[in-house]
Image (cartoon, rainbow, N blue to C red):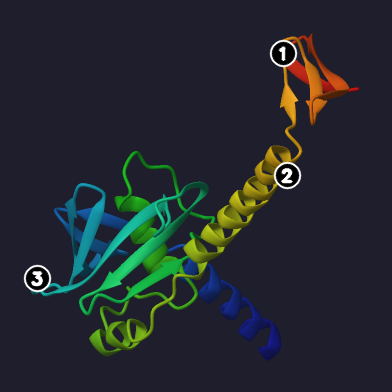
Amino acid sequence: MKIKLVLVATMFASVSVFSQEVKVKKGEIQIDGKSVAKIDKEKNNYTISDLSGKALFTATITNETPLKNTVSKYWMQLTGSNGVVKELELIDKTSFSFGFEKPITQNLTKSENPLLPASGIDENKINSFFQTEDRSISKSEDNRIEEYKEINRSEDALAADNKILISNVGIISANNEKIGYIVRKVTGKDMVQQFL
């Protein structure tokens, strides 16, 4: 019987942790009605401060890498007061919002080890978090794009070396000799290219 009670209590405790109500009211982040931090918006950057107004870090949701590549994936980028950048995957359970304020606050409060827990800000934890940089998400995206660009460059060089040309009527030639042709077929909404 005691095991069942402990199990039920554990289930309710875990449900209450994940069902925290996070709101932003008059510039304050509130968890279950208790103010834990302040948030201030400047364009798409949000400054997170303690309740006295001391800025701790900035947060934004972005899909632009340091090499200025824009990708389809979004992540949260945090910048500490010491300038160190950390990138975090977005958690799936964020609700819809026209701005970034709500997803940022939900990601900062509802992750496994939140920077903004319901108990309030722990400045030592935040300072420790920003001791090392982590740009693994954007670097991975940049590496993927650079790999793709390198493949394109090598294919372009190969085409230039062999003088591969495609005429406006679809004739493919290499070194001034016809080697094939390309036909475009439109079927419904899709355009299919066939190399023959």
Residue type at mark 1 is Lys
Q: Residue at x 24, y 55 (%)?
A: 45
- Determine which residue is flagged by label 3: 53
Nearer to us of marks 3 and 1 is 1
Q: Secondary structure at mark 2?
A: helix
Question: Mark 1 or mark 3, which is nearer the start of the sequence?
Answer: 3
Q: Give the number of marks.
A: 3
Name the disc covering residue 189, or none.
Answer: 1
Which residue appears at 40% of the width and 60% of the height?
A: 76
| Crowd class of label 2 (few under 14; some 14 to 19; many from 20; radius 10 Å) | few
Location of residue 80 in the rendering, given as x and y in whole percent from the top left corner: 26, 75
Task: Say if residue 21 shows up in the picture.
Answer: no
Quadrant (top left/top right/bottom left/bottom right) for the N terminus = bottom right
Out of 66 and 11, give the one closest to the viewer: 66
Determine crowd level at label 1: few under 14, some 14-19, many 20+ residues with C-alpha closer than 10 A: few
Query: Which residue, given by chain and number where applicable, does mark 2 sit on?
Result: 158
